[in-house]
Amino acid sequence: MRKEVIIKFIGYVLLFNATFLLLSAAISLYNSETSFIPLLFSGLICIIFGVSPFIFVEHHNQISFNEGLVIVVGGWLITCTIGMLPYLIWGGEFSLINAWFESVSGYTTTGSSILNNIEALPKGLLFWRSATHWIGGVGIIMFVLLILPQSTSTRLTLLNAEMSELSKYNFRFKARKIVHVLIIVYVGLTLVQTLALTVSGMSFFDAINHSFATIATGGFSTKNNSVAFYNSPLIDAIIIVFMVLSGIHFGLLYRTFTLKSENIFSSPVVKAFLGVMLIGIFLVSGKLYLSNTYDFWDSLRYGAFQVVSLGTTTGFATADSAAWPAFTHIILIYFTIQCAMVGSTSGGLKFDRVYLFFKSLRKQLTILQHPRAVVVLRINSRVVSEQLETLTLVFIILYFITLFVTTLVLTMLDVDLYTAFSASIATIGNVGPGFGEVSSLSNFATIPPLGKFVLTINMLLGRLEIFNIIALLMIRKGN
């Protein structure tokens, strides 16, 4: 592999981050805040290390898949490292491990936090915190691909390294078109939600921060009590709508907005996803009402919000679900594992894989009954290859093995089983809140330092979908 080529492409990543660091610094300067110097210094560091490869590294037209893999994984790791600098320099609750945890949680759109007092942060730092969500939501490599002055083969290589094979099924476009579709939908949803939240009574600053977190399905709020701070059914409803939209495949959203025949209304996967979500809302809201936790409308309001929030890996909260009946916890844990669709900003196992698993199970049962039958799996009218079917099943197994190992490590560090289990699910699924000591209106401050580091590895594994990390470790020296 050519190290100089990898460094040059990571330079693009650093320059993109520098843009948001300097914008955050400008907000801090405007408000005369103590975070101005940390943000400005971090932005300058990004610019220096981002520009240097363009001076010392010659132009290259093509990259190999292994080089693309290192660029993607390396880009994420370096981005998370740079992202922790403003927190670390500013101080407060940000020790080294806490700054790393908050940075990784932001970029991977996990939304878990170590902060006990979010509202103590200056506006510039709050904006940077939300910006890490927005940068990581659609993937920083996607933004780089938009402006990348390279050949089509280079874009395709990086795209293949960044996106899972299953997520490409509803992107029937060329590599550059896929990037355009992602960015158009992503930016469009962010602008519309910001406007809607501003009209509904949020300040513009809070509206854009919560839109960054919603569309990226991240969950960082500017308030200690998350969305519960506003106590507004209208704001809850707006955020629910945009969480659902952000959990649907962006290719299908684009085809819906452009009035194509293959859209969210014709997709069986979308219908199944929304159907399962509605069942979850019915079960959780029904239990809340029958257990006299809330009245009927509040049961529906809080139950719907929490199911959608966890089911799309956003992680916002309008109520403390830790105090809810155990039955609701089981339902919510299921949605924390399942999560939303591929091709969206959601993390986790992904609904499409669960959908494919049950179709595969049905296929195997049919073959057992009719050994000579030829059974073909399809998703949205497209045939699913045997290779992709096997890859999906292997991914599911690896996902649960990772979940088990992380829970085991946390319990070894004397974290109670319920907290360890839910924290492991919440981080590998990039969901944010769990239960126990890390519930919806709590945080991860009490987790031991080594436990926090292990959970950040979980976040990265979840965001990069495990295979990329494994493939990187298997690259032989000299390839």
Image: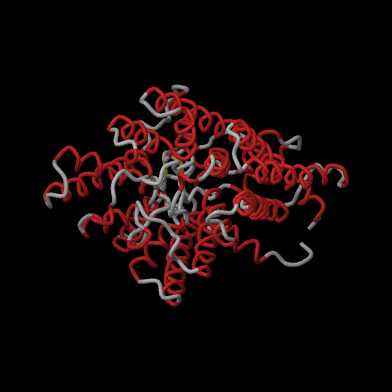
**Which sits in the foreground, 425 or 154?**
425
Q: Is residue 276 left or right of residue 186?
A: left
Give above or below for 390 relative to 71. Answer: below
Q: Quadrant of residue 357?
A: bottom left
Residue 279 shows in this picture: yes
Q: Residue at x 83, y 42 (%)?
A: 54
Q: Quadrant of residue 429?
A: bottom left
Q: Position of residue 29 (x, y in %)?
A: 63, 34
Q: Residue at x 36, y 49 (%)?
A: 310
**Which sits in the foreground, 443 or 61?**
443
Residue 378 shows in this picture: no
Q: Which quadrant holds the C terminus? A: bottom right
Q: Position of residue 105 (x, y in %)?
A: 52, 53
Q: Position of residue 414 (x, y in %)?
A: 41, 75
Q: Residue at x 48, y 42 (%)?
A: 345
Q: Is residue 335 left or right of residue 110?
A: left
